[in-house]
Amino acid sequence: MIQSDTINFDKKAMVSKVLTFSCVDGPGNRLVIFLQGCNFDCISCHNPQTINHCNDCGDCVSSCPTGALTLEKGKVKWHKSLCSECDKCIEVCPNHSTPKITTTSVRQMIELVDKHHAFLSGITLSGGEATLQLGFIIEFFKAVKASAKLSHLSCFVDSNGSLSEQGWDKLLPYLDGTMIDLKAWLDTTHLWLVGRGNQRVIESINKLASLDKLYEVRLLYIPNKTDLLTEIDALATYLNQLPAQVNIRINAFQHHGVIGEGLTWDKCTKEQMRQFSEKLVARLGRNVLLPSVYL
């Protein structure tokens, strides 16, 4: 058992949003914490306001219809009690960020989990890219594991896989599982799509799989843009090396939340997803998980 006196309950994170109930972010019913900030700049991102941090330019203040935003001493301040969650501030933000960020301590997050723990199977840290705030995740997961009331909750991270091997080593003692995105097979395609190559992503998948810490690999199918179909044989050969218990999920590119160039791309239809998934399943010899909604 982890000693509570070794936990930094004052460690803080920049939190974009918290869902107190989700059944699509890992196994069972989960509390999901979305941390602000990402080191990828995906053209296809459906949550681009989580990439950058607010630079306090103030452009969003006048757009708020309820007066929930003010500019005080050069800083944008969000008044949650006045907010209608219309997201107009996100729409007008020139920095593709959000002023609705809370700085939350481990202690505060544990108190929130405690309120909902009876209905939960686990906790998932997502983003943005959650592992950019690795220190918070470690202290938070340590606190969960040290709590007699909460220790039954599984601790998962939803990640782009960019964390270094040393970073994973620090987190592994408190980690139960991960979901990792593999957005493209060729390094050049991945570099074009997200601004970084995929070597570290594949290294993360391999490491986590070898330690039974990989719950799911997520593929993003963008017809005529990504290389998953043209490289399907190599992709399937690689995925077949992963343990049988690892879920393979295919996400269909849609326009929801996307900005910029991605809005000019064709959405992935249900029929296109069926055709691609059938070809992949034929090569894998096992089923894959598919979207239930196309927006």
Image (cartoon, rainbow, N blue to C red):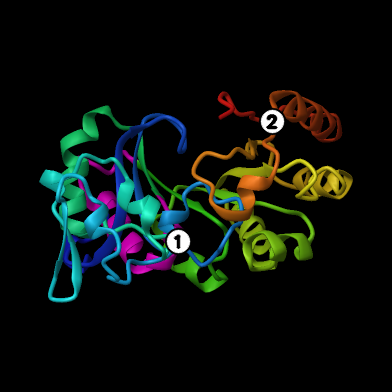
Mark 1 — residue? 51
Residue 238 location, x and y as percent? Answer: 79, 50
Residue 145 counted in the magenta span? yes
Q: Is residue 63 left or right of residue 24?
A: left
> In the rendered view, would you say 42 is above or below 118?
below
- Mark 1 or 2, nearer chain start: 1
Q: Main secondary structure of the magenta part?
A: helix
Q: In this view, does 54 lie to the left or right of 159?
A: left
> Could you tell me how many numbered marks the image carries?
2
Q: Nearer the viewer, mark 1 or mark 2?
A: 1
Q: Which residue is drawn at the image coordinates 21% and 39% (left, top)?
A: 84
Given residues 141 and 275, the one toward you in this image is 275
Q: Which residue is drawn at the image coordinates 41% and 63% (left, top)?
A: 94
Q: What stretch is highlighted in magenta?
A: 126-153
The kind of residue tagged 2 is Val
> In the rendered view, would you say 181 is above or below 130?
above
Assess disc 2: are there few (<14), some (14-19) or many (≥20) residues with their C-alpha within 10 Å of its C-alpha: some
Q: Is residue 238 left or right of residue 264?
A: right
Assess disc 1: are there few (<14), some (14-19) or many (≥20) residues with their C-alpha within 10 Å of its C-alpha: many
Mark 2 — residue? 288
- The outermost residue toward the front is 62
- Rendered-image quadrant of the C terminus: top right
Residue 73 location, x and y as percent? Answer: 13, 76
> In the rendered view, would you say 144 is above or below 273?
below
Residue 52 location, x and y as percent? Answer: 42, 65
Q: Do the residues labelled 1 and 2 touch (CB within 8 Å)?
A: no
Instruction: Tell me how far mark 1 sits from mark 2, CA to CA.
Output: 29 Å
- When asked about the image quadrant of residue 246, the answer is top right
